[in-house]
Amino acid sequence: MGVLLFLVIVIAASIPLAWLFRATLVRTLPHDIAIVARDMPLTAAFGLLVIGVYVFVAVLAPVLAPFPERAVVGTQFQPWDSTHWLGTDRLGRDMLSRLIYGARNTVGIAFATTTLAFVVGSLLGIWAALRGGWLDQGLSRFVDALMAIPSLIFSLLLLTIFGTTVMTLILVIAAVDATRVYRIARSVAQGVVVMDYIEAARLRGEGNWYLIRREILPNALAPLVAEFGLRFCFVFLTISSLSFLGLGIQPPTADWGSMVRDNATLITFGNVTPLLPAGAIALLTVAVNFVVDWQLYRASGLKEQG
Amino acid sequence: MHAVLVMILQRLGLGVLTLFVVSLVIFGATELLPGDLASSLLGQSATPETVAALRRQMGLDQPAPVRYWAWLTGVLQGDFGVSLASRRPIADMMSARLGNTVFLALYAAAIAVPLSLILGVLAALWRNSLFDRVANAGALSAISFPEFFVAYILIFLLAQSGYFPSMVRLSPAMSLGDKLYVTFLPALTLTLVVTAHMMRMTRAAIINLMASPYIEMARLKGLSPLRIVLRHALPNALAPIINVIALNLAYLITGVVVVEVVFVYPGLGQLMVDSVSKRDIAVVQAIALIFASAYVLLNLTADVLSTLTNPRLMRRK
Amino acid sequence: MNDKTHHTGMTRRGLLKGATALGAAGLILPASYRAARAEPQKGGTFRIGLGHGNSTDGYDPGLWDNLYAQVFAASRHNQLIEVDAHGQLTPEIAESWESSDGKTWVFRIREGVSFHSGKDVTVEDVIASLNHHRGDEATSAIKQFFDPVTDIRADGQNVIVTLDAANGDFPYLMSDYHLAIMPGSDGKIDPNSTDGCGPYVVESYEPGVQASLTRNPDYWKSDRAHFDRVEILAILDSAARLNALMTGQVDLIDQIDPATIGMLEARGVANILSIPGNAHYVFPMDSRAAPFDDNNVRLALKYAIDRQQMVDTILGGHGAVSNDNPIGPANRYFYADMEPKEFDPDRARFYLREAGMDSLSVDLHVADAAFSGAVDAGALFAETAAQAGININLVREPNDGYWDNVWMQKPFVASYWGGRAVEDHMFTTGYATGASWNDSFWSNERFDELLVKARSEINEDLRREMYQEMQRIVSFEGSVIIPMNNNYVMATALNVATPERVSSNWNIDGFRAVERWWFT
């Protein structure tokens, strides 16, 4: 019951916050952007606000965190008090500081991974659609085969082979994600490449790179952006699931996915500690997708007018 | 109809090719893993002599291509072989677990698919309403919790108070009702995990069509919004929805190892992870093939169904 | 997920005249257990949830390597010799054993014992069971312990084992859990059979899921095996195990996350059993590789670890501080008065300077496969070491392949020992020059010399002196950091009763809870 009440309070508080934030944006931003901001729905304003706060926290983590990321500053599982606002974790590290540093590491890793996956996946996908024929068939069949292997088990295999530094973690998850992006990008691009304007550009003698960049990508962007929103959040989940299977990020780095895993058993006893990092992930997921939804809506709206 | 048949045959052919590539990738990756079956069976007590003896006994001293070829010819004759770790026939090891995996997947899908369709349609119908927002945010929060964590929360809420068992213990003598009861929590966990994706796609696909002229026409005719969505928008929006459903069904079969671990559910995922860590390649390969076949077949079904719902797609192919 | 178990040790019993009883093994139980104690009652289905057991587990006794296999084996098999709750060797299928010179050992096989299949246990069965682990073609994990055995033969109701050199500890090998007595034919056992002469008969077994057994109606021990049925479940996830116990789906679980022991106790739905023994967690350093080849560096690291904090945090208090000593308080010659190593950053810095360094940076490779909490322990170590100017860079390795790829491969890792009941066995397997589990590749002349001398020393005081000097050498010159002795922690339902003493020899009452415990 308490949790429900808490949720209601949070939602009730976030509406005026989002409204205030939007009003501030409208006032402070230059005129042409302010127009866009004015038409922004409250959900999107809320999403932007949350993302802004996360980025702010991530960038200023060392300044904001009351304690260092990895320092043991108390005993195990201290309750919430005035020194340790959110108590301490299983080693006696300050939970709030870990959460704050977690924002930096988690969001950083998720962003790097997703960006990499999208750059590689969508470029290959569009390229395959553009060239067609042998290259398309070969690439697509290979990607099909990779996608037919359960992604968690495939990541497990790769990470066991290549080790679990942050770099390999990013590369492996990006590689697995890229196959999904490839498929979407290719199918969207296939619809685009048959258009007359592509044919016209080809006749003008434009190169592949130009076609991808100037003609196809802008027209295939919307579904890719939608996918980006979800994929971005799935990275946390993948890291969390991997740490469930004994892999995942290198300690003592604070990262939300692993923090959920490390403290998960506590929920068995009704202790809310693991809900904090899980909630942080959930809030970011919701926020990112609110913004994505708004962007999609704008994209389709603009298309209608044009 | 003929065109659909040709497409199915074509795709089945490609599917076999996919399976072949999968088996190569899995074999190669497992070979690259440090250590082999012999050393992992002996673990810390491995000495060079016993490892060598075990390798000889299991035929692991053969070069990799020879072992792959032996495995491939066996499979082509319908023989998955014997697990080297437990010395039991792989077909026996897998059959019960495959049944369990499929049962859980169907159970979860039976809840999740109707639920997400209804929620998606309603969200599209009442677009931008409070219901839409709450359903959206709720679904997004549900998928942003790791699976094992959703499972723990459900256990805390529903098992500790005694409503449902926290651990699934199946016996062959169980009635279907009992089976549904004991597997309710894992099925519910999976439902929460997959619903959001399908719901969002349903909503998006319908909304995407709501601006089309023919919907506008229907609206002008004064049809009720529900009727417009159900009779006019939904049928044309089915293709992407079917695709997402197929993708999620494939996930329910192949990707649920974490849920299996938490609920002690004897499915294929756990067997695969165990076999990977024991380097029992033949078992890993067999399960990978089953997973890959499930994936290929579900995708094929989705494509056929969406072609049937939208004949225009056929011409494009 | 995939724990490996170290080998059983051997106790030295009866041979060296004047040897006192082994040190206190086992545990005097808390009041909550004793209050419920009465004469053992028969009946009930005992359900055990273990954090081990894989779907790939096989039947071959030579390859049993996890707690699931061990408990399952103890439920259906007997061995020649049992280790009782006091750490003493007790006759099982061997009625008695003796040797005049320590080279030729005579085991007298009990008559009137039968396998579940009805066949009588014969001398030939015993020999076939032993030979399964012996010889060039053997693939058993304990093959090397049979290397000194030159011959095993039958002589009436006796089995005669001949060794190439005297070994007073040899009978201890016969209590090893791998050496189940199984029916043989043509001098070979069928390693895939579940037939045994133990307390319970296997009804069904699904590897990695569960085993169901019923009481062996013809069991020769009349005062054991109190449950009607036993079910052993593999529950790998620690939260799932806790939930299963709390919701009454199982009666006994192992491996409780130390962080949750206090909360579980507070619930009042379970009894916690915490059994101190010789088991210990270690951080071996490769003494051949720089910088660990300098004892000053090793000492610096030894003073840079906060042992009490480790016990409190990693073990949740269920253990004891160790002074880099592989010999535990349950051992006979345990050196309790050795000067302790408190966490002392200044002293660590001092040794660093002695080694000619201002600061030190090393990689520590860990995975929870080494012991549960190893990653956390590494993080704690890194924190305290930082205060002494030592930068420990924690490298988390995959659990999968840890023993192949990391342990004894990387220079600074985490590992664990089950502990040994006998000093000689501990030192011989883990610390003698060139020993196969000398995971620090450490070599010390004086230590090796003492090890050989102590083996045959008859004077009790002199032996004590020698073993204590060896403990000192390992502690202050050795290349392993041993911060703590861990207890075996289990939790049971409230209606489970145990004998007065629970064995510290192995987890789950020396694997034998199934035949020693009962329901009240």
Image (cartoon, rainbow, N blue to C red):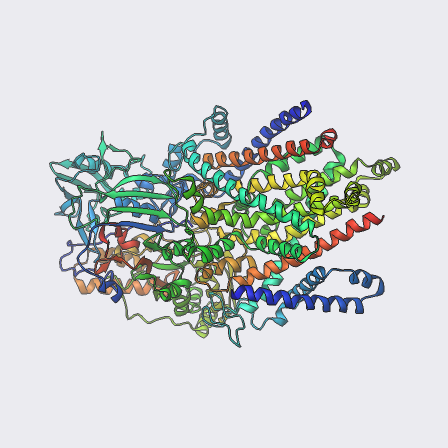
B60 left or right of B209?
left
Front position in the image: C317 or A150: A150
Which residue is depicted at the point 52% across and 34% down?
A: B289
A158 left or right of C334?
right
Front position in the image: B29 or B208: B208
In the image, residue C334 above or below residue B245: below
x, y percentage for residue A137? 68, 32
x, y percentage for residue B119? 62, 49
Is residue B295 in view?
yes
C79 left or right of A275?
left
Is residue C74 in view?
no
Which residue is depicted at the point 30% across and 63% down?
A: C471
Front position in the image: A11 or C378: A11
> Quick one: which residue is furthest to the front in this view?
B222
Which residue is depicted at the point 45% across and 48% down?
A: B261
Count of marks, rendered view = 0
Which residue is depicted at the point 72% across and 46% down?
A: B224
x, y percentage for residue B9? 62, 25
> Quick one: which residue is furthest to the bottom in this view?
A82
Front position in the image: B113 or C363: B113
x, y percentage for residue C356? 49, 68
